[in-house]
Every structure is written in structure tokens, then in C-alpha cells.
């Protein structure tokens, strides 16, 4: 590995993904031991050309000698390209570069909804700007995945559900949860509403991922029901934890539970 020295990555210390890949760059020798610095420790006197607002959204790579700064995907490609020039050239092929850039932005702008944290007092927060397009994309992606997995898993609950495999039903339930929470919470939460919905979708994503392994394992209806109940309990605990981190109280969790009880009642009523 060729070490890219005299460069510093400005990363979000509260983001596990950021910590992981910046540490990996150092551990494998692609950057020197002083090659990264948490965002909240930066000193603008040392980084004269750094755009701190942009650095909150895209990880910044600063050339210590020239003070030149690159951001986001270009920062990562600069590091990778120093050790693997051919790989970086392939990634810069326009269609691939555009796709990777959109993927990077999708994760970066939603990272606090994927993995939230409680902001520590007196610390400069590395919180990305709100981008409606990427938030909607995240909501739609999770909704689609949840609909497909729930529809497949519902077949394992055949003895306990009046209706069997029903893709449209699961899609309506997933979208209905968003509409329900929006109806009760949008005005109450104000500016925090978008952050809450993003976190709620991550709770749904966690539940969806937990339901995938049993799809490939033979289970009785009772075992599937018990597993599903366990997953819902985990989701509720995680929902409550995230609401606590956001400082928005119990009402969102109460509303979340109420919707699921209502949906269950409707399913059995019309079944």
C-alpha cells in the first residue's frame, strides 16, 4: 500500500460508518496514523480553505501542504487512487461515478436517521443538511423493501392470519404507518418531524432485515408468530430509544403502537 501522507480526513466521529472506513484507511496503511481528525476538533486557523458547512455533508480531505480540499466521493477516490490508480480510474467512469456519487449522498444525508446519536453539550455537531429528495428516497426504499419482505413472511403466519400472501395489503400498511404518524405528529414535532420519520423508517428497516433469515428456514406457524412478536418487541424498544435520543417523548411510540393494534383489528375484521 502507498501511504497518502500530509493529508487529513475530516470525519464525523459520531457516525460508525465514518469511523470504520477512516480507521480502515489508516490500519491498512493507505493513510498515516495522523491521517484523520474529528469534525468537532478542527481549527479553521489550520485549514484555511476548508468549507465547514460542506464538510458536514461530505467528508473532507485536506492537503496539509497546499491547503487544497476535496469533498465526499472525490476524497475517497483520492485516497484509494493513491494506492490503486486503476481502481480509481474505473470508478471515475462517468456513469459509475454518477451512481457512486448519488449513493454516497444518499447515505451521507440520511446517516443521522440511520444511526442517531445524542449531541453532547459544547460540541460542534457534524450534522448534515436536510435534503428532501434523499429523505424521500430513503422512505420509499425502506417502504418497498418492507412491503416485499412482510408479504413473503405473512405466508408463514397462514394459520393465524385470515388473509394470506397479499402484497397490496402490506404496501398499504407500510404507507399507512407514515400517514398515521404524520397526521398525529407533524404539527407537534415541527422541525423534528423529518428527523423522526427518517428514524421511524430505520426502525422499519431493522424489523425488515430481521424477518429475512426466517424466509429461508422451515417454520411452523406458531414459531413464525413467536418470532414475529419478538421482532415487533425489538422494533418497539428501538423506536422508544430513538425517540428518547431525539427528545420527543412517549407520544410517537404510543401512536406507533396504536396504529399497529388498529391495523391488526381491521385485518381480522375484514378477514
Image: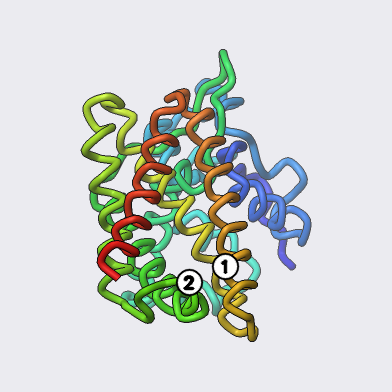
Q: Does any portion of residue 90 appear in the rendered image?
A: no
Q: Do callouts 1 and 2 mark residues in contact (Cβ within 8 Å)?
A: yes
Q: Earlier in the sequence, mark 1 or mark 2?
A: 2
Which of the image's four quarters has the N terminus? Answer: bottom right
| Callout 2 secondary element | loop
Quarter residue 164 falls in: bottom left
Quarter residue 142 falls in: bottom left
- In this rendered view, identify the residue nearer to me: 215 or 189: 215
Q: Which residue in the structure is indicated by mark 1?
A: 225
- In this rendered view, identify the residue nearer to me: 151 or 13: 151
| Callout 1 secondary element | helix
- What residue sits 30% from the left and 26% below the top? 189
Apparent side of residue 151 relative to residue 184 in the rendered image (left or right) = right
For discs 1 and 2, the disc positioned in front in the rendered view = 2
Q: Which residue in the structure is indicated by mark 2?
A: 160
The spot of residue 128 in percent (x, y) is 40, 38
Which of the image's four quarters has the C terminus? Answer: bottom left
Amino acid at each position: 500500500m502507498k501511504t497518502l501522507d500530509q493529508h487529513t480526513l475530516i470525519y464525523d466521529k459520531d457516525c460508525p460508518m465514518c469511523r470504520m472506513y477512516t480507521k480502515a484507511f489508516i490500519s491498512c496503511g493507505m493513510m498515516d496514523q495522523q491521517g484523520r481528525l474529528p469534525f468537532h476538533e478542527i481549527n479553521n486557523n489550520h485549514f484555511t480553505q476548508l468549507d465547514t458547512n460542506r464538510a458536514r455533508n461530505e467528508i473532507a480531505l485536506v492537503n496539509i501542504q497546499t491547503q487544497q480540499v476535496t469533498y465526499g466521493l472525490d476524497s475517497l477516490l483520492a485516497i484509494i487512487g493513491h494506492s490503486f490508480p486503476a481502481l480509481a480510474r474505473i470508478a471515475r467512469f462517468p456513469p459509475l461515478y454518477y451512481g457512486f456519487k448519488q449513493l454516497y449522498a444518499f447515505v451521507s444525508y440520511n446517516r443521522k436517521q440511520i444511526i442517531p446519536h445524542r449531541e453532547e453539550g459544547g460540541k460542534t455537531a457534524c450534522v448534515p443538511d436536510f435534503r428532501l429528495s434523499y429523505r424521500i428516497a430513503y422512505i420509499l426504499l425502506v417502504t418497498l423493501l418492507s412491503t416485499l419482505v412482510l408479504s413473503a413472511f405473512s405466508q408463514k403466519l397462514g394459520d393465524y392470519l385470515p388473509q394470506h400472501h397479499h402484497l397490496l395489503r402490506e404496501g398499504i400498511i407500510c404507507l399507512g404507518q407514515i400517514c398515521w404518524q404524520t397526521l398525529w405528529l407533524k404539527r407537534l414535532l415541527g422541525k423534528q418531524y423529518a428527523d423522526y420519520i427518517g428514524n421511524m423508517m430505520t426502525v422499519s428497516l431493522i424489523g425488515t432485515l430481521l424477518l429475512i433469515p426466517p424466509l429461508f428456514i422451515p417454520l411452523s406457524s406458531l414459531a413464525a408468530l413467536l418470532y414475529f412478536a419478538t421482532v415487533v418487541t425489538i422494533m418497539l424498544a428501538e423506536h422508544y430509544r430513538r425517540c428518547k435520543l431525539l427528545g420527543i417523548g412517549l407520544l410517537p411510540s404510543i401512536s406507533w403502537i396504536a396504529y399497529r393494534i388498529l391495523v391488526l383489528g381491521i385485518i381480522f375484521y375484514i378477514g
